Amino acid sequence: MFRSWLALFIAFVIYSCMVYSYCDKRSVSDSIPPPHALAGWKTWQSKNCQACHQLYGLGGYLGPDLTNVTADTNKNEIYFSAFIKYGTGKMPNFHLNDSEINNLISFLYWINKSGKSKVDKEKVTWSGNYNIEK
Amino acid sequence: MPNFLRLYIIAALCLLLATLVFGVLATWAFLYPETYNEFLPFYQLRPFHVSAALFWIITGALGSIVYYKNTLLPQEKRYNYTERIFIYLWLTTIAAIFLCYAFKKFGGREYWEFPPVLCAPLLVSWLIAMFSYFSDSLVMGKERKPMYIWMWSTGIFFFLLTFIEQNLWQLPWFRYSYLREITVQWKANGSMVGAWNQMIYGTSLFLMVKISGDETIANNKTAFLFYMLGLTNLMFNWGHHIYNVPAASWIRSTSYMISMTEWIFLIRIIQGFKSKLQERKKHRHLITYRFIIASEFWVFMNLLLALAMSIPAINRYTHGTHITVAHAMGTTIGINTMILLGSFSYILDIDYKSSIIKKSISFSYWISQYGLLLFWLSLIGAGIMKAHQATVLNINSFQQIMAPVIPFIKLFSIAGIALAIGIGIIAVIYIYYTFNSTKPIN
């Protein structure tokens, strides 16, 4: 019994190390967040944005998924800035200062660079799996 | 019953009551954010609800394990002092977490929305709990152990591993890639659910052994095979959370492949249906048994949903919709909560109480079951509508996507009230009997 358990556990440890090391195949220069984005990430967490919004479909459902919000050509930084600064009926005003707002927008631009949240129909293969690796 | 064991049960039940109250309030805040934003916004209510639910399950599961482990030990080895230290430190940290939420201090991680500094006392208390649990010869001795001991041990050990993994984001290297960060985060979250399921399913197995008086249930080859299958799923079946993340494709393929082994669980449930019916006739007068049967019904329903969601082509529609919430709430309420309520009714000897108490629990039990069914179906309905709007019709406007979803959320809110009343009455009765319990551990 213990031997079977141990064999499985060793497989788990090896698999975990592989996940940590190789899950993102992009180069470091492509994946690393710029300092403003890193600061924006902190704001995202401290204001608990994920309670209402999603990134890659993960988070709360009160607001929209923001993974690729910055890719929308109809919206620009001024639009995002006004939205965050004053809130809406549904979204409270968090009283963020301009620097925090800019950092948050940088974070969302950086997230957009990591990939697409929605999987296109064409990416589904015959086996029911996807082919969306970056 | 010693006071510290009373504390485990009462604290867990109070967390359950808090989950219900914050859950009902959160659905209203979701429907009417303009009103709630003034005094108790959704982004504040959700962490209260989620943390209360998470700590209800873990405290309840560990409380049950500590109680049952003591019943298996000789008198002189009972009531290890470390079990007391754990519960005091654990509950103090939970109180600090709720205080942070009250002052809008967040850490902003899914499930763990409190400032990360509070992970330190949680980690220390869990290490104390582990030391207490694994220092007993009952667990570490060389003789053959029943499967529930294996399951409890696995759950307690993997909770520690996944808790540490959940905090790896605090190391800068993990934050240098968002794909890595989100993959590791959901690897840890997915496996952690598997860890607490091991603790709770172990408790369910222990209860079935005690109700039936048949020790072979926990000592046969089938129990071993299903334990190993469960463990494999705990370790490798978490990828459905991040199918849409453009991480390495072998992560997706591994999870997809492992998740298909869950069909074996489903076939096993269908095969055992006839014998369960006979067993049910024999034990249905027992409140404890009813909760176990309810959990088995919800295992079946949620397994169907999980199997569908594990196929990436279907997950493309369900991900990011309320179908995911249906699965999360269906399992935490229908499976985990039902088993824990069954466990507490066994500990508190509810089956030997007056008929009026048993009738009240029975009545509340049925309210909670029908409430949960409506709750679960309305979430699936909401999810189907959202998937249709967002993925089939490809609508981009969030307002347009949500418009047909809202009526289902209103239905969900009403079902949530029924569910809260049903489970709430049971929890209050159990708290009363825990305060007044004179039962020795035996």
Image (cartoon, helix red, strand yellow):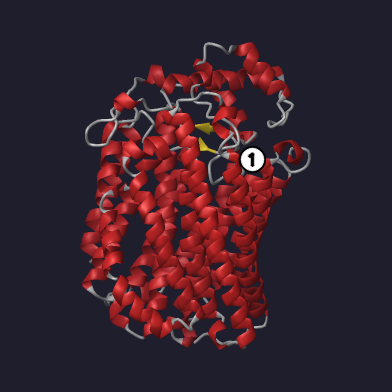
Question: Quick check: can you spot residue B173?
Answer: no
Q: Which amino acid does label 1 sit on?
A: Phe
How crowded pointer 1 is (Cα within 10 Å; few <14, some 14-19, many 20+) is rated as many
Residue ID at (69%, 32%): A90
Residue ID at (39%, 17%): A30
Residue ID at (63%, 51%): B413
Residue ID at (57%, 81%): B348
* Element type where label 1 sits in the image: loop
Residue A130 point in image, percent of width and height: 29, 31
Would you place residue B193 above or below residue A91 in this image?
below
- Of all chains, the one bearing label 1 is B
* Tag count: 1
Residue A5 point in image, percent of width and height: 26, 60
B137 with respect to B250 (left or right): right
Would you place residue A31 above or below residue B234 in this image?
above
A81 with respect to B248 (left or right): right
Label 1 belongs to which residue?
A: B106
Work out whether residue B210 or residue B138 is closer to the camera in this orientation and state it: B210
Work out whether residue B349 or residue B234 is closer to the camera in this orientation and state it: B349
Tell me where residue B15 sits by quadrant: bottom right
Residue B356 point in image, percent of width and height: 64, 84
